[in-house]
């Protein structure tokens, strides 16, 4: 299956570099290029791509608002947004994940890592490696936006085991690692994660991490 990608960045040279990189991959194609967030949203609605490479800082509509527009629109909700930032874990990252982004990378990430990240998102997973998740937790989970907390009642439908799995997801552990930590198989862990996504109306693991912290199920430190 060919992965369709929209590339959004207001810097023409940077955008062009990403386009060339994606087009060089045998399993990917670029279906649109956007110079601002509004164009990115319009292209997502037109082409319904698998992945949108979204710069955070763009004119007209910034990447965060563009991401929110893409992930909340029923017509484009299937698109995964990979946020691109110049600064490692800057103040925009937490907001980007809350807006529905499935992961983030630095713009100077090696091409092979960028392509691997696109494949991860296209497969339906979130790009939140354990090390990244823990840094995100350390930097941002203890200072969400005002009024951003999700009511703990959201967790009421969860079984005790599902709560345990959610805690592990919030720790950045993979399905196989969760299985080892909870003494269950990786397949069973994957099933629990799938149920969590459904019960909590979350579209990927990144959203599960946010829910775990915002409901107070887990706390920084």
Image (cartoon, rainbow, N blue to C red):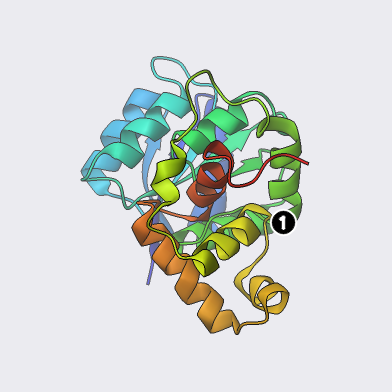
Residue toward you, 150 or 43 = 150
In the picture, measured across the screen, residue 128 lies left or right of residue 132, that is left
Q: Is residue 25 above or below residue 80?
A: below
Residue 27 visible in the snapshot: no
The percent position of residue 67, horizontal first and vertical second, equals 41, 34
Residue drawn at x 35%, y 41% is 71
Residue 105, located in which quarter of the rendered image? top right
Most extreme residue toward the top is 60
Query: Is 130 situated left or right of 212 in this image?
Result: right
Q: Is residue 107 above or below residue 128?
A: above
- To which residue does mark 1 refer? 130
Q: Is residue 4 left or right of residue 20?
A: left
- Which sits in the foreground, 52 or 181? 181
Q: Position of residue 179 (x, y in %)?
A: 64, 77
| Snapshot quadrant of residue 199 | bottom left
- Expressed as whole percent of the image width and height from the top left, the position of residue 108 reads 72, 40
Q: Quadrant of residue 197?
A: bottom left
Q: Residue at x 62, y 52 (%)?
A: 170
Q: Is residue 42 above or below residue 2?
A: above
For the point 65% across and 25% down, the residue is 143
Q: Position of residue 210 (x, y in %)?
A: 54, 42
Q: Nearer the viewer, residue 19 or 114?
A: 114
- Give the structural element (helix, strand or loop) at label 1: helix
Q: Is residue 49 visible?
A: yes
């Amino acid at each position: 299956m060919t992965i369709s990608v929209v590339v959004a960045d207001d810097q023409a040279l940077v955008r062009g570099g990403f386009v060339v990189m994606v087009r060089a991959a045998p399993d990917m194609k670029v279906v649109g290029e956007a110079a601002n967030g509004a164009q990115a949203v319009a292209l997502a609605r037109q082409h319904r791509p698998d992945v949108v490479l979204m710069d955070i800082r763009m004119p007209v509509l910034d990447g965060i608002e563009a991401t929110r527009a893409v992930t909340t629109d029923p017509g484009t909700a299937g698109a995964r947004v990979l946020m691109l930032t110049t600064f490692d874990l800057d103040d925009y990252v937490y907001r980007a994940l809350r807006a529905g982004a499935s992961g983030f990378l630095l713009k100077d990430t090696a091409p092979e890592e960028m392509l691997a990240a696109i494949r991860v998102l296209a497969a339906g997973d979130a790009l939140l490696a354990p090390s990244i998740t823990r840094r995100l937790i350390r930097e941002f989970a203890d200072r969400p936006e005002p009024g951003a907390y999700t009511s703990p009642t959201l967790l009421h439908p969860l079984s005790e085991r599902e709560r345990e799995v959610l805690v592990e997801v919030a720790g950045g552990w993979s399905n196989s690692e969760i299985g080892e930590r909870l003494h269950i198989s990786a397949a069973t862990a994957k099933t629990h994660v799938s149920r969590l996504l459904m019960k909590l109306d979350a579209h990927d693991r990144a959203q599960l991490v946010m829910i775990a912290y915002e409901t107070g199920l887990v706390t920084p430190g």
